[in-house]
Amino acid sequence: MGMLVLILLIAHLFADYPLQTDFIKNNKKTLKGLLLHITIHFSLGLILSSAYIVYFGKGIEVLLKVILCLVFIVVVHFIVDYFKGKLNGWVNKKSESYKESILCAIIYVLDQLIHCVTIIYSVQMIFKENYQVFNKIISLITLEKGFQLEMSTKVLFTAIIFLLNIYFVGYLIGILLKSFRPKNLVVETVMEVPFKSVVNGSLYYKDFRNSDVEGMLDKKITEINSISAQRKITFIKDSPANAGMWIGVLERTIILILCMINSISSIGFIIAMKALTRFKQFDDKSFAEYYLIGSMFSIIFAIINGYLIRNIWM
């Protein structure tokens, strides 16, 4: 029954990410949205579990226990998601932007941990067997020597890591970067000045070392015609909806595969190719920092997941 735990984890990840529609996301604070969400969880879990039962020739008794597991799982899922919505609402009102991002990320990770632990313990509790799933996960993370898995378990673990790399990591990075997201414009200030050498109240060339140029102009310029300042604003049209998300998905997937085949040196090409698509926006310092932080997070998680899968198949 250890495979059943992994199958239910896969069902959870599919139901919580690709099968969670915009309607469900926008209505998860309502009873209707939550009920629809857990119905999808229950249905997908039952479909995948039934396929497992039929394939391995399990009896009706196993199916009934699986249904009991799913009922327990979705009830806990409903309660956790309800309080998560309340907690996120409180955090959004009380916290500053960067603190809000960190707290929301912690809530997000804890939410997923609770769901996964609930699945593992519900199966162990109802089937009254110890599948040592936690021990296998710890052995996988610590790269324990002599760690071996059956072929079917390897396939399921690989599928789980791929889903985590694509969806879990993507949403986590989005939450962490929320407070860093820049506006889609680049501002450039162009100034024309005669640079008079000695005139009381005039602007000296050396004054341009001051970083607050516009504030300096307001204080020191006495002759209205002695200087002119123009602000050039370039608006950057945003990319289509979810384009950035899918670029991140492809980036992490390719890096994960490169790590699996031990070709980590090729990651530089992926980074360079991604940078070309945003070259113009690098004029905006806030966007450049946002882009760099997001890319670093994405690369780090992808490398970790890639080597986890590599360790599974070694």
Image (spheres, helix red, strand yellow):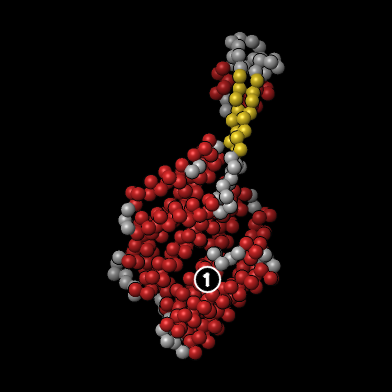
- Within the image, what quadrant is residue 302 found in? bottom left
Please name the residue shown 57% across and 76% down the image. 42
Position of the N terminus, as image quadrant, is bottom left
> Total of numbered circles in the picture?
1
Q: In which quarter of the image is the C terminus?
A: bottom left
Where residue 142 appears, as percent x and y from the top left, is 36, 64
Q: Which of 280 and 91 is in front in this view?
A: 280
Examine the rendering and report whether any part of residue 102 can be seen.
no
Task: Note whether 2 is above or below 88 in the view shown.
Answer: below
Where does residue 300 sit, x and y in percent of width and height? 43, 53
- Identify the residue shown where x is 38% and y is 73%: 153
Residue 139 place in picture, x, y as percent: 36, 68
* Amino acid type, mark 1: His
SS label for mark 1: helix
Find disc 1 in the rendering and name its residue.
12
Outermost residue on the front side: it is 240
